[in-house]
Image: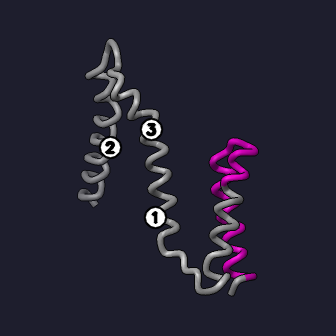
Amino acid sequence: MMHSYLLIAVISLTTMLIRFLPFIFFKEKTPAFITYLGKTLPYCAMAMLVVFCCKDIGFASSAEFVPQLLCGGLSVLLYKWKHSTSLAIVASTVVYMVLIQQIFR
């Protein structure tokens, strides 16, 4: 039990340290390189997640790739329409589950 509390404390302190260090080091002006990374890394992370999720798509039958293509497109369209990441994720996940469990068995 004590081990769990110690683990949570270490993780919390590490997270706080990582979050506070930029404010400590760059009190006056943030370097242009750090600003550039802050703008580009979120897009890189999303691209890596898309590649990771799509790497095992099989094209042998439509049941293998159609649900993923439909829900990926749905996610993009919902985000473009409503600008809500949560809505896009939840709706596309629900539709994907319905597709793979009810329609594309």
Mark 2: secondary structure: helix
Quarter where residue 83 is shown: top right
Within the magenta stretch, is there residue 37?
no
Q: Which is the main secondary structure of the residues drawn in magenta?
A: helix
Going by the numbered disc 1, the residue's amino acid type is Phe
Within the magenta stretch, is there residue 79?
yes
Q: Which residue is mark 2?
A: 12
Q: Which residue is mark 3?
A: 40
Going by the numbered disc 2, the residue's amino acid type is Ser
Quadrant the C terminus occupies: bottom right
Q: As displayed, is residue 44 above or below residue 68?
A: above
**Mark sitting earlier along the chain (1/2):** 2
Count the numbered circles shown: 3
Taking the image as shown, residue 54 lies to the left or right of residue 80, namely left
Taking the spot 30% from the left edge, 20% from the top edge, the residue there is 26
Q: Which residue is mark 1?
A: 52
Q: CA distance from mark 1 to mark 3?
A: 19 Å
Q: As displayed, is residue 1 above or below residue 46?
A: below
Dot in front, 3 or 2: 3
Q: As displayed, is residue 14 above or below residue 101?
A: above
Magenta residues span 76-103
Q: Residues within 10 Å of mark 3 (few under 14, many from 20)?
A: few
**Mark sitting earlier along the chain (1/3):** 3
Q: CA distance from mark 3 to mark 2?
A: 26 Å
Quarter where residue 90 is shown: bottom right
